[in-house]
Image (tube, grey):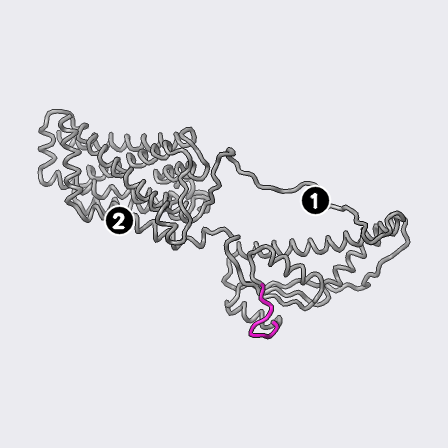
Amino acid sequence: MLRFLATIRKEWQLLLRDRMGLTLLFVMPLVLITVMALIQDAPFKDYQEVKFDILAVDNDHGRLGRYIREGLEKSGQFNIIDSLEGQSLTAGKARELVNDGKYKVGIIVPEGSTAAIVSNANRIVNDISQRMGMSIALPVKKNPDSLNVIIYFDPAAKKAFKGAIHQAIDNFLTQVETDFLLNRIKQQLRRKDTTATTESDTLAIRLQAVGLKEYATGSQKQADVISNSVQHNVPAWSIFAMFFIVIPIAGNMIREREDGSLLRMKLIPGSYLTVLAGKMIFFVGICVLQFYLMMLVGIYIMPLLDLPMLVMGQHQGASLLVAAGIGLAATAYGILIGTLFKTPNQALNFGAISIVILSAIGGIWIPLEVMPAKMQLIGHLSPLSWGLDAINDIYLRNGDIAYVWKNVVLLIATGLAMLAIAGAVEKRRMN
């Protein structure tokens, strides 16, 4: 017990004397998560929160152009621009502005588009009428023109953005053609049905019998949490910062061997495992303190920077357990590095670079699901990935201990394995 308490006291005194180490442990992570949340805020924003300027040239002046304009404006995602400096846009001017990168999208509705849609709807209704034995025929163009709504994209526009705009415009085209077709069918049915003679009569024709509605996957008590820059970056970079505990731990252990303080600790009766246990308890406590300090930044500081507030889920016991598991793995890794390497430069360089690599492949920088399949397999071997998955289960999926126990067991087992290796190496060195 004396060894255990002496180790905790020694580590506390060393940490207080090392102002640079304290800065590294507490101040630098706060700066890191704040900067990362700020610079990644835009990529994480929901598309409904971002408005894009779209150049629109309506050469048709018919229902199609109005429908496309009204649909884009109603979505709330687009600002429709059809004139600049008091002059109406032309197709050539729109193309030039988009090509120069001044605007991301330009839409050109060609002349005669609405007439082409009407003619096509009449053709379909005429065919239906003939099959029903009705002799009335609607006017149809004999040689219909091949018309297309033209979309210009900024050459630097992303593929996902292009796909979203394509899908939106295609939906508007489908909807307006469907409306024309339904109107023609209603007119024909009114002519056939002599009981429906007034203009106020309407026929309830619906193409969609089954709708689409989004529901939460969790329980009704689940909080409505959106994955945004704060929700990803604060936990992710907090885990990254917690693993940087390896630098003060490894540095302290090497200095202890060099100045003889480790030898004096070993002279105290008892097992060397009590020394390791003292280090573990102290630094795991530091890691947990570090974690919750950064969570408080996400809750109280981020909103002051016009960023979303961090939501920590409803199971704080599970969150504490995960934080302790991450701290155990990080501390054990620091002890292992401090045991294996002989000089501070070797230990600190290897520790820093290895943490950067483990964080990169573990989904801290970018989510694992966007990585190649082989990299995803490698990434799932990183302890940082286990910690991040567990935190996301709690914060985003409203998970409890039953959700995260597997990742916690992996973290603890990995930490104990690293401690066992460090103990074996140190025992061999003592012999």
Tell me which residue sits at (39%, 50%) in the image. Answer: 303
Crowd around label 1: few <14 · some 14–19 · many ≥20 (10 Å): few
The secondary structure type at the circle numbered 2 is helix
The residue tagged 2 is 27
Instruction: Give the Cα distance between marks 2 and 1.
Output: 57 Å
Tell me which residue sits at (50%, 56%) in the image. Answer: 50
Q: State which region is magenta.
A: 80-88
Which of 358/170 is in front?
Answer: 170
Left/right placement of residue 83 relative to residue 110 reads left
**Looking at the image, is mark 2 or mark 1 earlier in the sequence?**
2
Left/right placement of residue 266 relative to residue 66 reads left
The percent position of residue 395, horizontal first and vertical second, equals: 42, 39
The percent position of residue 328, horizontal first and vertical second, equals: 28, 34
SS majority, magenta:
strand
Tell me which residue sits at (57%, 63%) in the image. Answer: 54
The residue tagged 1 is 208
Residue 414 placement: quadrant = top left
The amino acid type of the residue labelled 1 equals Gln
Quarter of the rendering occupied by the C terminus = top left
